[in-house]
Amino acid sequence: MNIIPVVIAGGSGTRLWPLSRSAFPKQLISLTAGGSMLQETVTRFAAMESVGDPVVVCNHEHRFMIAEQLQEVGIKGRIILEPCGRNTAPAVALAALEVVDDDPVLLVMPADHVITRPEDFWVGALRAMRAAEDGFLVTFGIKPSSPETGYGYIKMKDGAAGGGEVAAFVEKPDLDRAREYVDSGEYLWNSGMFMFRAKAFLEQLAGNSPEIYEKSRAAYEKRENDLDFIRIPADDFSRCPADSIDYAVMEKTKKAWCVPVDCGWSDVGSWESLWGVSAKDDHGNAISGNVVAMDLNNCYVRGESRLVAAVGLEDMVVVETADAVLVIPRDRSQDVKAVVRLLRDRQRSEAVLHRKVYRPWGSYESIDSDARFQVKRIVVKPGATLSCQLHHHRAEHWIVVKGTARVTNGDKVITLSENQSTYIPLGEKHRLENPGVIPLELIEVQSGSYLGEDDIVRFEDVYGRDRC
């Protein structure tokens, strides 16, 4: 039977701030390997003969980055765009509805988990497939290595090594209760990975959470194809209750089955857990980037844009990016979420954006700014075109430093080469294109009373962003 991976890629990854931010979350970042976490997930079992092309469910704001990363690793898949987050049950319902006619076995995996021994996971997946073919909804349980309070737990009825029916799903416990679970040897971590046939899942969803099923199905039936994406209408999908697979189905169904796997799994849900799965030196330190370390023990230190010097630290996390630095004890890694909430309350852009922001046409990076000016470095991919647009509150100067630019400025179309420039007056309709075969790089100097990214009126966009 064919297996279709369903990759859930809609998370924001706030617990790994400042590296992960809502505009560029952790599933798009390389944390432990050469590719991003999404790329590691979609290629993990791609070579298996019985595995088909994946269905990826993601936030519509990340769609171009998701599509580009799939192309980079040669994966063809269907990308379903969630107009708003409704947790995993509605997301998987959309994926199941997309493939239900063939009724394949679905292997549901979050895009931001680490599996260091995929061959061991695959052994468990083959056991799970047999149960899925018999109509069971399978969850994968992980043997606990510590009394972790950040995971839910699973207890099987018979504790069989090869899998068995679920006796109970348990909420994330406090530390004392977690110790009891681990000491008993009767509980497994709930990994958030599942396997079941598409029709079986939809039947159980309809029977146990009928409103989620009906609202998801109604929204899916009004889907539209948009470029290479499957777009779900926002008005309909926003009416769907938000709930996880565990609450909506697994805790209610009589068809829950658990397969234990020991595969080097981690949800990388905090800097503490990322330290746990990272390669370390003889003193227990996980160090990456431009870092000078002296007298460190059991630390995670990461430098992204400049030299980081760390001396005399123990059990600490130090993460540097171009616009933020985090210093926190490892055992308080969960408190990063509170930092992000504070930044959002203060309307700080660092909660959402990096200095370098990716767009379907390339990227821009903020170099300097003040009350009435901003300087950006813009890179446009070969053959790419920005939207035809205007700004009500700012004018722009463009200076080409590499490549060739075709500029529409009002009624004029001009070509600029290196060291040439042009001026876009406030309120003037304009467009930037790269007609060349190498990336176009330019410096943009904005000046005006308001410099926010929302001061854009789009008239035409080849990427359909006027629909967002």
Image (cartoon, rainbow, N blue to C red):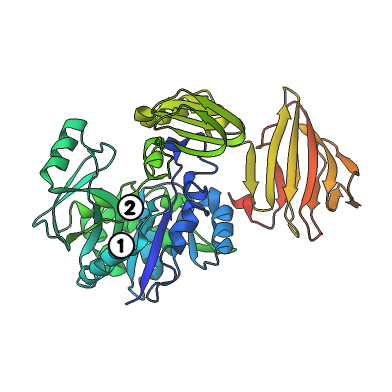
Q: 235 or 146, which lies in front? A: 146
Up the image or down, 39 lies above or below 277; here it is: below
Q: Please name the residue that numbered disc 2 is placed on.
A: 264
Q: Please name the residue that numbered disc 1 is placed on.
A: 120
Q: Is residue 274 visible?
A: yes
| Residue 210 coordinates in the image, percent (x, y) | 26, 56
Residue count near mark 2 (Cα–Cα under 10 Å), binned few <14, some 14–19, many ≥20: some
Q: Which mark is residue 148?
A: none
Residue drawn at the location 31% of the way across and 56% of the way down: 263
Residue drawn at the location 85% of the way across and 50% of the way down: 407
Up the image or down, 148 lies above or below 437; here it is: above
- Residue extending farthest to the left is 158
Q: State the image quarter where residue 308 is shown.
A: top right
Residue drawn at the location 85% of the way across and 45% of the way down: 400
Tag 2 and tag 1, C-beta contact below 8 Å: yes
- In-image side of 323 versus 376 (left or right): left
Check disc 1 and give the amino acid type: Asp
Quarter that holds the N terminus = bottom left
Q: 425 or 103, which lies in front? A: 103
